[in-house]
Image (tube, grey):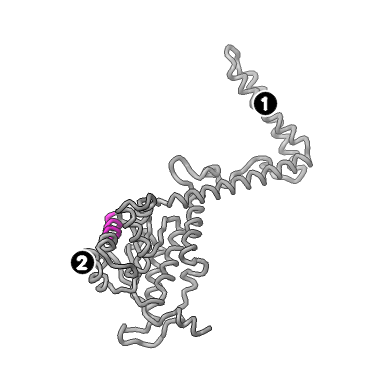
Amino acid sequence: MPYEGSVIRAATEELNEQARRNRSSFERRRQQIYTRAPRLREIDRQLSQTIRTAAQTALQKGVDPTPALARAKEQNLYLQQERRELLSKYGYPEDALTYQPLCPLCGDRGWRGSEMCQCLRTLCGQEQIKQLSSMLNLGDQSFDTFDLNYYSPLYDATIGSSPRSAMEFALDICFTFADKFGRNSVKNLFLTGAPGLGKTFLSASIARVVSEKGYSVVYDSAVNVFNRFEAQRFNRDSQAGADVDRYLSCDLMILDDLGSEMSSPMTQASLYQLVNARLLGDKRTVISSNLSLDDVGHRYSPQVYSRLAGEYLKVSFYGEDIRRQKKERR
């Protein structure tokens, strides 16, 4: 799950800040306890000194450390018992003066060896959602808030069902894709339909759920994506290569509004590279477009059409423009 560097940096900073606040809170509590029971401060000082003295004795050459270590152990046990009794007397738990990290698995470091700890992974998911929210308005876009009432319940002979029934099916496919991400037989989606029918809304809902599961998600418009491919190809921007790598390697790539960009041999080549590389790497992709699959074949290339038709599940959106409906209801 290769999170972007900016996501990992921001999540690490947040983890460090949480650990700092936790340490500061512990220090304040400890000083409060010491103020109420000064003897506890002295006991902790003596415990620390006993451990250091025993260690120094053990390191001295030519001296049998056994008697000193035995005395240190006996004194240590006596002090610990007195410590527990005093804490109990003042109404504190036994571990009140023992620092507890927020994450017992990694000690708030964020890593367990070379593996990212779940605590940092969770923060990465949250940070990723923040970054996606700046583009997708994830504040209210979720599967729970997708309103089917904007779609007509009346039968439409051109689609063989009502728009609402068709969109219930589309909603179910998108939810299952996100909820079972990585375990679903459906690996890629092609969302197609006229503008204003909820393609971006459901794309954002997918992004939210998959991010919360701890996967890396990149969302971008076709215009921006193809501009970055072009900048990389002609070395116009040092960051472009890193952006293209993100598009190709993230767990889920959401390419929004395919067909809104100016058509050129460059965009055709970039789309083929994106689609083909992600299929070869077994990476999941969601593409939304106002174009039909046939339109994609005419606009781009037979190779792109073949891969989308063969490897993507087409999800058709029907109904009337929701943005216009909302405007008319105001």
Rendered position, 25 above or below 217: above
Q: Amino acid at mark 2?
A: Pro
Q: Nearer the viewer, residue 184 or 205?
A: 205
Residue 230 lies, in percent from the top left, at: 31, 57
Residue 103 lies, in percent from the top left, at: 55, 46
Answer left or right for 120 relative to 250. Answer: right
Q: Earlier in the sequence, mark 1 or mark 2?
A: 1
Instruction: Return the residue at label 2.
Output: 302
- What residue range appears in magenta? 272-280
Residue ID at (71%, 45%): 29
Q: CA distance from mark 1 to mark 2?
A: 78 Å
Instruction: Return the residue at label 1.
Output: 50
Q: Amino acid at mark 1?
A: Thr
Rendered position, 29 above or below 252: above
Residue ID at (77%, 42%): 89
What element does badge 1 sit on?
Answer: helix
